[in-house]
Image (spheres, grey):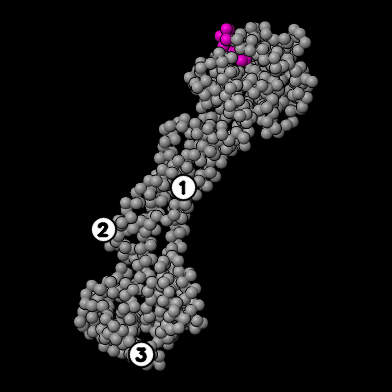
Amino acid sequence: MKSVRCVDLCKTYRQGDLEVTGLDHVDLEINEGGFVCLSAPSGGGKTTLLNAIGGLDTPDSGEIYLAGDRIDNLSKGELAEMRLHQIGFVFQAYNLIPVLTARENVEFVMEVQGVAAASRRKRSLELLEEVGLGGLGDRLPAQMSGGQQQRVAVARAIASRPALVLADEPTANLDSQTSDQLMELFVELNEHHKTTFVIATHDQRVMAYARRVIHMLDGRIVDDERRDEA
Amino acid sequence: MGDMKIVLRLAWRNLWRNHRRTLIMLAAIVVGTWAMIFMTALMRGMVDEMVKDGISVLPGHVQVHHPDFRDDPTISNVIGPPSGELLEALRRPEVVAWSTRVRVPAVISSEQDTRGVTLVGIDPDQERGVSFVADDMTEGRFLESPDDKGLVVGRKLVEKMETDLGKRVVIMTQDPENEIADRGFRIVGIFDSKLDQYEEGFVFAGQGTIQNLLGVGDAISEVAILGTDYRDVEGLTRRVADAAGADTEVLPWNEIDTYLGSMLAVMDGFVIVWIVVIFLALSFGLVNTLVMAVFERVREIGLMLALGMTPRSILTQIVAESTLLLVLGLAIGNLLAWATIEPLKSGIDVSIVGEGMEFFGAASVLYPALYLKDVVLANVIVIVLGFLASLSPAWRASRYDPVRAITQVE
Ligand SMILES: Nc1ncnc2c1ncn2[C@@H]1O[C@H](COP(=O)(O)OP(=O)(O)O)[C@@H](O)[C@H]1O
Ligand SMILES: [Mg+2]
């Protein structure tokens, strides 16, 4: 079973009179348990592709399957349900809810899912420890650095043990040491829980952890570099 | 919805995010609620006094007449004095007092002037319990018995007719055969009334004296009955009607004096209009605050949607935020209204402005009347309309595009 399958995805944005290519006939299959990097220069279409796979944005044409189920024709409500239960997200620009503490942010997805308070709490404390934020659980996002916020977002993305994690430049705000810690965490989750990771990045250090790197340019896949079966 | 707890927590935290804005809006709701309830209590108090005074002037709560009396209030349409079942009904505890009256149109002449009035023959002992006249004598004495030969008139009439206490006047009216019946009376007492029309339009004499003058034996025009509460006269009216039999017409005060009767209904309508008007003023602020709050939060609302929170939960969150604010404002507003009305219960002296108000039948001391139904109405209107007003910004928030929220770089 493929974790992700994209068939001939196209997406064009309109900026005034200009037509901008977001995705240009993208075909892609990612195995369950894969650890894949999407690499492209800025504007290459990484975010557009992640949003399409994550059911946040619909392509103009093409088909998307997650774990074998077609998602590009689902309703908004069905997509929300799907995102809540199947995907962990780390977004590029904006990740945390300002009125919730670090711990509450980590627990957010679990709480919306209806996970009991006790197990939520246990998991969030464990994860905050793991991303190096033990003791900072009661801080509000505004009281944390960009890197700390990013790690809270990562903890939230994996908290509910989703089958698929989509991370959009997760290390953009992190120093190299923290960024290595984070990637090691991803690798560990990938190996132990068979969680599939798709990570958009243009950071070479991140790509070093990947078993497959898909290179994009102007919305097209230009190279698919498989380091082992993924 | 399983995520109700987090939805409410988010609503509550977001409410206190912009302290200043929330406190200003809260103050507006508090003041608005206070104004709704306080002003309503004042107006209720005023109208209650007017109605009570109006009832005490003559109508009582329920009256028994000849069926034709209202169309033709002359001595031709009379009934016998209460007896049998009716008398029994009048002795029940729900009847506080009752009196019989002979009532005819008449002309009164002094040396200077002649005027049309309503001549009322009363039994002074009975009448004391029902209407105002005995308490409002300012000069001379009240009638002493049904056979009293004196006449009690209003202060205004005395002035207009340039007569005075102790002087003689002539009363002229028609007997049942349409023959002129007239008699001289000495003015033995002068009364004051809150309503000029009563001072000018009504004169009182002994009931027996008038029955003699008209040659009608013991026939009377009406029985006026006072119950325990003027707002609840339906039952009393029905029971008196059953006892009085078919040859009579039994009516409650609000059908006898339709002006007074409509006053209460008009007041009910006015209270609703008043509450809604204040609410509308409030709702502009409320909707504006919400629109602003929602607009500022495009990104985090988009984020919540992206993470899989349903649009419905977002909608609930915004509505909950507005409802929390309203409930808080209402609670404080209600308390404030109660705290300001309670010390004024013993009456507010408005005699300075009261002079001009007498024309409308208003009293010079105002007793605010806090009715539970008005308080409930104000609260229900604010909550229900507030809920409806917040739906539009909440709906807008629930339609936000998650992609815009998460890709837009600040
Ligand atoms: N909402 C949008 N409106 C218009 N153009 C967009 C929008 N989002 C992305 N684009 C354009 O689509 C192209 C791909 O963007 P994106 O997927 O964000 O690239 P990346 O994430 O690799 O930097 C870029 O040229 C970008 O300008
Ligand atoms: Mg991007």
Inspect the image, locate mark 3, and give the three-letter code of the amino acid beneath it: Leu
Q: Are marks 1 and 2 in contact (CB under 8 Å)?
A: no
The residue pinned by badge 2 equals B352
Which chain's residue wears label 3?
B
Compared to residue A167, the image places residue B194 above or below, namely below
Label 1, label 2: how far apart the Cα atoms are: 32 Å
Ligand 1 closer than 8 Å to label 2 CB: no
Residue A184 lies in the magenta-colored region: no
Foreground label between 2 and 3: 3
In the image, taking residue B397 as reference, residue A226 lies left or right, namely right
The residue pinned by badge 1 equals B279
Inspect the image, locate mark 2, and give the three-letter code of the amino acid beneath it: Ile
Q: Which residues are magenta?
A: A169-178
Compared to residue A200, the image places residue B101 above or below, namely below
Which quadrant does the N terminus of chain A fall into? Answer: top right
In percent of the image, x 32 and y 53: which residue is there?
A: B344
Residue A175 lies in the magenta-colored region: yes
Label 1, label 3: how far apart the Cα atoms are: 61 Å
Front one among B83 and B119: B83
Inspect the image, locate mark 1, and give the three-letter code of the amino acid beneath it: Phe
Which chain's residue wears label 1?
B
Q: Is the residue at mark 2 from the same chain as the one at mark 3? A: yes
The residue pinned by badge 3 equals B214
